[in-house]
Each structure stands twice: as structure tokens, then as C-alpha cells.
Amino acid sequence: MTATKTSQRLILALAGLVWAGAIVGGFGMLIHEGYTPVPATSPGSQFPRSTGLALDAKRPTLLLFAHPQCPCTRATLHELNELLADTAGKVDATMVFVLPPGAPHGFEQGPLWKAASGIPGLRRVIDAGGRMAESFHVIGSGHVLLFDPSGKLLFSGGITGSRGHEGDNAGRDAVESLVLTGKANLNRTPVFGCQLL
């Protein structure tokens, strides 16, 4: 075998190793991103009264905060749709679309807005500039808050198990249990979504 052919094989082998390493590294980054929640926040223990949102006097009130363009929140919306179907009108639900400062007119009009319009019992509101999100101390798209009729915070967190993934998860189970029975094994879960502002 000539030295040239040996060098070519060595170069091809090294290129193959670099290529395989890049693929493994890329998948590792995707997995890390999918399971990395937004930084945890501490919403107050009571519903802030000066937000423009109202508590239901007889049922728990659920708020879902979302960035209108966050692809991760599609899975949250799917989970919310299932949750509302399973709880059959026993919760008052509002999806708060948080618009970043300076967002152009119609920024909220995307796939999430359209999908939310098809969920029975889900109200949509716009939070221009993120004032409502700031009042509730939420920073990640997909953050769900559940309050009892007196305004006490019952749950804070996400209702997906990772970024953009649908299916069984502790957050959705906890919210559903709180709505149906008033009890749950946990009241806080990580939020997997884009930053709101």
C-alpha cells in the first residue's frame, strides 16, 4: 500500500470520527436543551388583584402564560386541552399571550393563538409588554398557575415533562388532581419553554 493511500484512509477515518463526534454532540445539546427548565421563580402566594384578570368566585382559576411564537408551548397547549376535557368545566381557564415590548401589531396571531381558539372553555387575553406576567412573577412560556376561589396559589409550574413533549407528566397530574379533589402530591414543577420577554 502506498503512503498516499494510507494518508487518504487516515484522513477519511479522522473525518468520520469528527463527523460522528459532531452528531453525538448535537444530540447531546438537544437533549440538554429539552430537559433544561427556565429559571425557577417564586410567584406570590396570593392572586395579585391589580392585574386586569379576575378570579372565579366558585371554581379554581387557571392561568397559562405563553409567548405567542414559542414552539415548545404547543405541547403545553395540548396538555391543557386534555386537562380541560378531563375536568369538564370545573376550572376557569385563561391563556395569557405575553407580547414583548415593541411587538408589531398582530404578533400574537400565530399557530398557538389559533389552536387556543379551538379549546372549549379557554379564554385568551393579550398582555402587551408583559405587565401581567411581571405581576405574577412568571418568566417562561408554558408557566401555569392555579388559584383557589379565595386567591390562594395552589400550583405553579409546567404541565409538560420536558420542552415540547406531550404525554403523562407530574405537573398536569397535579393540576388535574387539585381541580378534581383539592389535593395533590406536589404543587410545583419545572417550566420548559422559551423566555416570555
Image: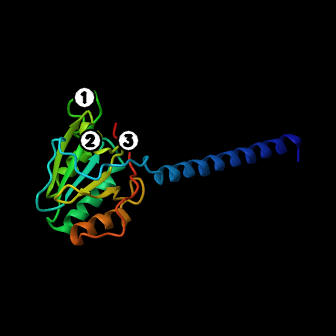
Residue situated in front as seen by the camera: 17 or 169:
169
Spatial CA span between label 3 and label 1: 18 Å
Residue underneath mark 2: 135
Residue underneath mark 1: 104
User: Residue 144 location, x and y as percent?
Assistant: 29, 54
Q: Is residue 104 visible?
A: yes
Q: Residues within 10 Å of mark 3 (few under 14, many from 20)?
A: some
* Quarter of the figure with the C terminus: top left
Q: Residue at x 20, y 63 (%)?
A: 84
Amino acid at pointer 3: Gln
Amino acid at pointer 2: Ser
Q: Secondary structure at mark 3?
A: loop
User: Residue 54 location, x and y as percent?
Assistant: 14, 49
Residue 97, located in which quarter of the rendered image? top left
Q: Residue at x 65, y 46 (%)?
A: 19
Q: Is residue 49 above or below residue 179?
A: above
Spatial CA span between label 3 and label 2: 16 Å
